Image (tube, coloured by chain):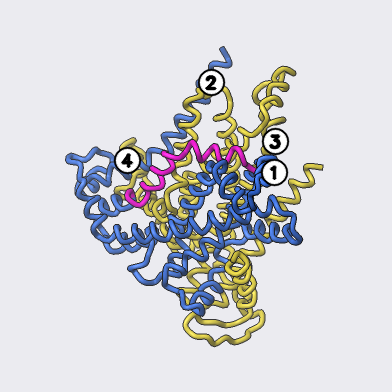
Amino acid sequence: MKKNITKVLLNLLCIVLAIIIVAPLAWILLNSFKTNKELFKDSLAFPEVWQFANYVKAWNLGLYKYFGNSLFVSVLSLCGILASSSFLAYGLTRFRAKGSNIIFIIVLGGMALSEQVALVPLYKILRTLKIYDTYWAVILPYIAFRIPFTVFLMRAYFISIPVELEEAAVVDGYNSLQIFVKIILPISKPIFASCAIVNLNFVWNEFLFANVFLNNKALQTIPIGLMTFKGDLKVDYTTTLAGLMIASAPLIILFICMSRQFVRGLTSGAVKG
Amino acid sequence: MVLFFVYIPVLMNIGYSFFRLSSYSASATFVGVDNYRRFFSDSVLPIMLRNNIAYCIISLIVQVGFGTVMALILESSAIAERMKGFFRNLYYIPALISLTAVGLMFTFIYEPNLGFINSLLKSLGMSTYGWLGDAKMAIYCIIAMSQWQFTGYITLLMVVAFQNVPQDYLEAAAIDGAGPIRRAISIMLPQAKEQLLVCTIITVIGAFKLYTEVYATTGGGPGNNSQVLGLFLYQQAFLHDDLGMAAVTGVFIFVITVTLSIIQIRVTRSGQQ
């Protein structure tokens, strides 16, 4: 009996928490389908007619351009992050070269350093390199700043792969690169999925660097676009809300589709030291 | 690459903190510790420290503390197997939305006239508040928003760690007569200690590099009441063109985060022996 009460209470707690998480989002979603007049009258009511036009308007008002920029920057950064991190992590777990410990410490130490501390000097460096205000001004720092955490996640996964698999491949005459591509990559799909989501989440939503290093409106990414957007639209609240929804949807949808892989990748390799 | 874009800028930042610099010219005048004197006598510093520390402490309690408890509940037998994944993924969704979008969403939610919270309070016949416009409340509104966004993130990370706890340990304990709470405290938590450490470090560092949340909601206002170190750095550098002062702020953030991380690692290590 007592056990059942605890069970009900715990389930209730989970449901209440779920409501707290969903309610603000539901309110935003609801109001993004209203006219401004309806919003001002009663923000809790349902819209009389669902205004899908808000979404079309937000998209055409320039959101599509920010969206494209974000997509371009995200894809390139993600490829860079995954490629360099996986090579580095694999090397660190398999080759006992001199200095590999130092490399490991340098890489992991990078996790503790925040973007702000590097902001001003990076700004100067990017200007000197003449890549300030180009896509590269954000892509390169993104890759560099995300390598530490990604290596950290991947290393733990690679350690859990039995070495015997590779020894067999060596007997078959594979070289290191072939082993990596033909054996390690296929069984590492889950960790790649996890790292892809974690990093996409960062890159797609990054604000500080994008705000400072991209000045040209034609290059700006979605988070900056949203701020500009709000400034341009002023009192057209519902269109802004629709814009917020468009900007947030891709990652949520992607996560829902990949959530199983995501959790599996993290579980099989999570922090084991 | 990590060295070039992460470490070198951090070192350069320390150098910059002794100069008077502008972002538009290459000239630099050596001013010794003048920037540091100005920084430590700035009247906004105590406010920023209070805000960052409040953010840090509340986040540790809610995100790491409560988030871990939620992870334990989600991994317990109280929640039906097929609901576990559902709740876990649902709680994670806010973490996928960009800080800018969440910030803009919550400016609407906190909006005094038509916002979600005040509309809700009004319909329940209760008195309404100014929220973000209120000098005393503003920073706590921002903190609350962050708890909403990131508690589920920590929950997910902890769930992953708990899933890695060997089942036979738990079964053995159950045979010895240990109840669910006892099992959680003496087996699951110690087994997941490393992950807990990572979560704590992420949260603490996050608290001191806080920037976008404040930028997108109050911009540090009203007055300077919700000012934080990260935003102050940005404003000094790119609004007041005082790169030296920004660099000092960067050094300050750097020292705080690195010191706190080292302390946490030490504390956990000493607990192990």
Q: Are marks 1 and 3 on the same chain?
A: no
Give me the chain letter of mark 2. Answer: A
Spot occupied by residue B199 in the image (x, y as percentages of width and height): 61, 46
Q: In the picture shown, does residue A70 fall above or below B188?
A: below
Q: Residues within 10 Å of mark 2 (few under 14, many from 20)?
A: some
Picture quarter containing residue B100?
A: bottom left
Query: Label 3, on which residue?
Result: B191
Q: In the picture shown, does residue B61 fall above or below A218?
A: above
Q: Earlier in the sequence, mark 3 or mark 4?
A: 4
Give me the chain letter of mark 4. Answer: B
Cα–Cα span, label 3 and label 4: 47 Å
Cα–Cα span, label 4 and label 1: 70 Å
Cα–Cα span, label 1 and label 2: 50 Å
Q: Residue at x 72, y 30 (%)?
A: B186
Give me the chain letter of mark 1. Answer: A
Chain part drawn in magenta? A245-273
Nearer to us of marks 1 and 3 is: 1
Callout 1 amino acid: Glu
The one of A103 and B49 positioned closer to us in this rendering: A103
Residue A220 visible: yes
Q: Residue at x 44, y 54 (%)?
A: B99
Label disc, if present, on residue A167 of the rendered structure = 1
Cα–Cα span, label 2 and label 4: 34 Å
